[in-house]
Each structure stands twice: as C-alpha cells, then as structure tokens.
Amino acid sequence: MIKSLSDLPIGETATIDSIKGNTIVKRRFMDMGFVKGTTVKVEKVAPLGDPIQISLKGYDICLRKSDAQNVLIH
C-alpha cells in the first residue's frame, strides 16, 4: 500500500516509492536525499504535529507535514 511520509507513525520505517509535485519540488527533495528506494524513518514529531523529524542516509532532517505529503512510501 502506497501512502505519504506524513502518514508514517513514529519509529516506523518505509521505503520511498516516488515524489509527487512539479519539477522544482522533486529536484529539491532529490537534492536532500529523498530518492526512490531510500529507507526513511520517522524519529520524532513536534507536539503540535508539525514538523516531522526524519532520518535517512545517516542524517536527520525536519520537514513540514505539507512537504512530507509529497513523498510517497510503501
């Protein structure tokens, strides 16, 4: 089942399937390491639910929920 990264619970891992959005959005995510086949894990979520701390490729990054919805996982 394909869902977005913003739906992934804390502590769970998933594999990136694709990035949705225009070319600029896709390029920005790819530059940050969000490429197909990469394993991602949700480390923390802010108390109000935004932003989300994601770990991938040995580093952590915080994304807004609205941005994380562009990353499709399975």
Image (cartoon, rainbow, N blue to C red):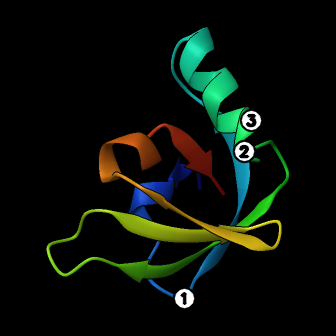
On screen, residue 31 above or below 47: above
Name the quadrant containing residue 36.
top right
Q: Position of residue 74 (x, y in %)?
A: 66, 57
Q: Secondary structure at mark 3?
A: helix
On screen, residue 9 above or below 67: below
Q: Mark 1 Cα within 10 Å, few/some/many (few <14, many 20+)?
A: few
Distance from label 1 to label 3 (Cα)?
A: 24 Å
User: Which amino acid type is shown beneath numbered disc 2?
Assistant: Asp
Q: Residue at x 76, y 47 (%)?
A: 33
User: Which amino acid type is shown beneath numbered disc 1?
Assistant: Gly
Sequence-first disc among 2 and 3: 2
Q: Position of residue 26 (x, y in %)?
A: 63, 24
Q: Secondary structure at mark 2?
A: strand
Q: Residue at x 74, y 35 (%)?
A: 31
Q: Position of residue 21 (x, y in %)?
A: 51, 20
Q: Residue at x 79, y 42 (%)?
A: 35
Judging depth in this view, the residue of 32 and 22 nearest the camera is 32
Residue at the disc numbered 2? 17
User: Which amino acid type is shown beneath numbered disc 3?
Assistant: Asp
Residue at the disc numbered 1? 11
Mark 2 or 3, closer to the camera: 3
Residue at the disc numbered 3? 31
Sequence-first disc among 1 and 2: 1
